[in-house]
Image: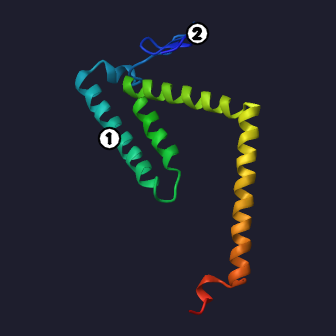
Amino acid sequence: MNAESDERTGESADGQEAELGSRAPEFIKSRRGLHLSWQVGVFIVGLAVVGAGVVMLPLPGPGWLVIFGGMAIWATEFVWAQLVLRWTKRKVTEAAQRALDPKVRRRNIILTTVGLVIIAALLGVYLWKFGFVMPWKIDE
């Protein structure tokens, strides 16, 4: 918890109150059985999307983006998912602000330059030793 928001009530520093809880239509919320079915359906769809995102983490695809999409689906119905998304948004915003700090940018540029020099040196050693030969054409 910080000074900017109270996560339990959803109240922000500028006085706007973010509503926590179900965003289902009123006719669904008014019937307990229908609302429970709605929540189960939202949970299953969100679980499928998060599961697809987890599969995409080691495979090609936007894994984290899909996982956050599944969390957004869950956040339409569940307070715990709304709180997790609120915390994640706050952390991403803080990281973006830190990344824009001139000292951090300078450090990142220096580290990138050093890494590129090392890669260029390794590539030069490889080309000096083996020449420009495609890996599948190397004779043993």
Query: Quick one: which residue is furthest to the left in this view?
Result: 33
The residue at which mark 1 appears reads as: 44
The part of the image, by quadrant, that contains residue 49 is top left
Residue 112's place in the image compared with 72, above or below, is: below
- Pointer 2 or 1: first along the chain: 2
Query: Quick one: which residue is furthest to the bottom in this view?
Result: 139
The residue type indicated by label 1 comes to Ile
Query: Relative to 31, is 60 on the left or the right?
Result: right
Which residue shows up at 56% across the image and 92% down it? 140
Labels 2 and 1 touching (C-beta < 8 A) = no
Q: Find numbered disc 1 in the image and state the secondary structure of the residue it sits on.
A: helix
CA neighbours of label 2 inside 10 A, class few (<14), some (14 to 19), many (20+): few
The residue at which mark 2 appears reads as: 13
Q: CA distance from mark 2 to mark 1?
A: 34 Å
Which residue shows up at 41% across the image and 13% down it? 8
Q: Which colour scheme appears in the figure?
A: rainbow
The residue type indicated by label 2 comes to Ala
Q: Position of residue 66 (x, y in %)?
A: 48, 45
Rendered image: mark on residue 128: none
The part of the image, by quadrant, that contains residue 90 is top right
The part of the image, by quadrant, that contains residue 22 is top left
Q: Position of residue 57 (x, y in %)?
A: 46, 52
Which residue shows up at 61% across the image and 82% down it? 135
Which residue shows up at 55% across the image and 29% down it? 91
Query: Relative to 70, is 93 on the left or the right?
Result: right
Residue 37's place in the image compared with 31, above or below, is: below
Comparing 54 with 22, the one in front is 54
Residue 58's place in the image compared with 100, above or below, is: below
Q: Position of residue 45 (x, y in %)?
A: 36, 42
Comparing 27 with 56, the one in front is 56
